[in-house]
């Protein structure tokens, strides 16, 4: 675009000439000003063309754009060993610190040809989602870091696709497309790798994952000066939803801590003032003028909410969500204020940091595959038996996190039902902070499609229109239980018909629905 650059320079000179002329020619002042504006617009347009086509600009390092936050799904983050484990077999490689365990092509080959016990023991969690039941033995796995950890599970390996199919590639193609076509780079794409074996609460307790997620999103938004696009896949949607609920509670706790700190600071200043012979009515900040008046007014509000007669433990009104933590609050009224402030801070945080949310294969009501994994095992394309896979999957907290739940949790119109009553209805709304209401989706489908929208989607009709669920006879899984019938024998014990080898007869059917998964009854069935 050399020509455009020349044109830009010429327009700039014309702008200066027109501006200078307008100072001496008041008669044509309006005309000259119009020329100046036009030339300036052309100047900006040419500069924009130069930037778009790779040319120079006044800010060559300004690469800001809405950041993209990538949250992977189940089994979609590379796990690295942080503890040595001897495999005890002459043909097996020991698992060393910084070795990839999920996934490692060398180990996969050994698993399929020699023995899978060492790898399976390494990736299996101990009781309560700890690393191992015996801390002196076993592996210590942690998620890898950065975008590379969620791009490919076994990078640089040709045989990985042959062994585990599409399991190897996660976000690699999306990251490459964003970089090639939209100019994204490491400053505007943020990966959120996590230990997908854990439930979200243990992710925060062990690794501080939710806290790091908040900080990474805030840093990306601050750097790029634009709210982020959240992209979550599979179980990542459940983790993201949990993160939002955690963030809301965290902001309430932060608001409460600020209010308590201010109230206690004021109390100390008041005690010091009274001990010094003062009236004890000074402000907590010691400021004067209008700022002192504002501070004094806020102190009066805090004084009301921290006085003993306004904090009678017997008169606490606490919400269902925070009942356990509210009982030992020192200032229950301040906690009420903190909840209001926290709600506002939560909405403000979302408006500031999240532009839009893209849920890919979002199992917000759970999924059947994790249920299948704990019932009969799911080897995910790895060279291990389903029986071995079931053993390690039963130890994962994540497997139970995405088990199916009642789809009734997704409908919002029953909140106004007279059967619930006003108090119960309010609690029900708090316990079910839906990302969307299934009844609204159903109405949109029926209002925006001509003809019968359910014709080719009978299962959606069952779920959304008929609301088939755990209180119906529509099971997710039906299992036939058969019993072997031995061939008939004579009085001497000999088989009457030697050609008959016995037969199998169906005795009963076991139906498993979301209620069984949600209550844990499915485990009793297969114990």
Image: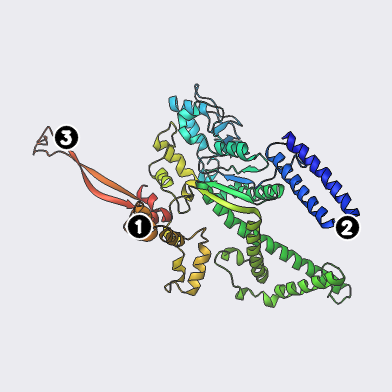
Q: How is the image coloured?
A: rainbow
On screen, 368 above or below 413? above
Q: CA distance from mark 3 to mark 2?
A: 115 Å
Counting the numbered discs, the total is 3
On screen, 409 above or below 426? above
Dot 2: element:
loop
**View extreme (top): residue:** 90
Foreground residue, 281 or 438? Answer: 438
Chain-order first, disc 1 or disc 3: 1
Residue on which disc 3 sits: 501
Q: CA distance from mark 1 to mark 3?
A: 53 Å
Name the residue: 79% across, 54% down. 34
Contact between marks 1 and 3 (CB within 8 A): the answer is no
Q: Is residue 465 left or right of residue 34?
A: left
Q: Residues within 10 Å of mark 1 (few under 14, many from 20)?
A: few
Q: Is residue 278 left or right of residue 317?
A: right
Q: Which mark is residue 26?
A: 2
Q: Residues within 10 Å of mark 3 (few under 14, many from 20)?
A: few
**View extreme (right): residue:** 24
Foreground residue, 468 or 131? Answer: 468
**View extreme (front): residue:** 27
Foreground residue, 208 or 474? Answer: 474
Chain-order first, disc 3 or disc 2: 2
Foreground residue, 56 or 27? Answer: 27
Dot 1: element:
loop
Residue 101: x and y, percent?
Answer: 54, 33
Of badges 1 and 3, the one in the foreground is: 1
Q: Residues within 10 Å of mark 2 (few under 14, many from 20)?
A: few
Residue on which disc 1 sits: 452
Q: CA distance from mark 2 to mark 1?
A: 72 Å
């Amino acid at each position: 675009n050399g020509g455009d650059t020349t044109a830009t320079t010429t327009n700039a000179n014309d702008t200066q000439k027109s501006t200078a002329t307008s100072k001496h020619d008041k008669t044509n002042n309006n005309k000259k000003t119009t020329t100046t504006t036009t030339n300036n617009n052309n100047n900006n347009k040419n500069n924009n063309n130069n930037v778009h086509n790779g040319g120079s600009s006044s800010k060559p390092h300004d690469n800001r754009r809405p950041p993209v936050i990538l949250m992977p799904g189940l089994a979609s983050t590379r796990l690295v060993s942080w503890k040595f484990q001897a495999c005890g077999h002459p043909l097996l490689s020991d698992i060393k610190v910084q070795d990839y365990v999920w996934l490692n092509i060398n180990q996969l080959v050994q698993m399929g040809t020699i023995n899978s016990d060492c790898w399976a023991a390494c990736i299996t969690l101990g009781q309560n989602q700890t690393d191992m039941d015996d801390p002196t033995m076993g592996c210590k796995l942690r998620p890898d870091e950065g975008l590379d950890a969620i791009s490919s599970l076994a990078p640089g390996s040709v045989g990985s696709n042959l062994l585990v199919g599409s399991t190897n590639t996660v976000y690699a193609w999306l990251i490459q497309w964003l970089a090639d076509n939209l100019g994204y780079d490491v400053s505007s794409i943020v990966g959120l790798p996590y230990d997908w074996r854990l439930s979200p609460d243990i992710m925060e307790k062990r690794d501080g994952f939710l806290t790091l997620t908040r900080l990474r999103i805030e840093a990306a938004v601050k750097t790029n000066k634009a709210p982020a696009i959240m992209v979550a896949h599979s179980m990542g949607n459940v983790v993201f939803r949990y993160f939002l609920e955690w963030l809301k509670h965290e902001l309430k706790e932060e608001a409460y801590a600020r209010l308590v700190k201010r109230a206690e600071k004021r109390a100390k200043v008041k005690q010091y003032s009274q001990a010094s012979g003062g009236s004890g009515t000074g402000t907590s900040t010691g400021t004067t003028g209008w700022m002192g008046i504002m501070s004094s007014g806020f102190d009066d509000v805090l004084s009301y909410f921290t006085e003993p007669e306004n904090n009678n433990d017997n008169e606490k009104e606490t919400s269902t969500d925070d009942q356990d933590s509210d009982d030992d609050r020192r200032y229950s009224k301040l906690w009420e204020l903190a909840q209001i402030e926290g709600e506002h801070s939560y909405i403000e945080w979302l408006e500031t940091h999240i532009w839009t949310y893209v849920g890919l294969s979002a199992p917000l009501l759970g999924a059947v595959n994790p249920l299948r994994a704990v019932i009969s095992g799911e080897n995910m394309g790895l060279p291990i038996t389903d029986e071995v896979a079931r053993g390690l999957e039963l130890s994962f907290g994540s497997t139970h996190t995405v088990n199916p739940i009642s789809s009734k949790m997704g409908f919002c119109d029953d909140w106004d039902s007279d059967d619930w009553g006003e108090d119960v209805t309010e609690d029900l709304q708090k316990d079910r902070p839906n990302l969307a209401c299934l009844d609204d989706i159903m109405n949109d489908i029926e209002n925006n499609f001509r003809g019968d929208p359910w014709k080719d989607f009978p299962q959606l009709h069952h779920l959304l229109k008929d609301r088939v669920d755990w209180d119906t006879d529509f099971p997710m899984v039906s299992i036939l239980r058969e019993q072997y019938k031995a061939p008939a024998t004579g009085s001497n014990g000999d088989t009457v018909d030697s050609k008959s080898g016995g037969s199998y007869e169906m005795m009963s059917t076991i139906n498993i629905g979301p209620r069984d998964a949600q209550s844990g009854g499915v485990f009793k069935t297969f114990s």
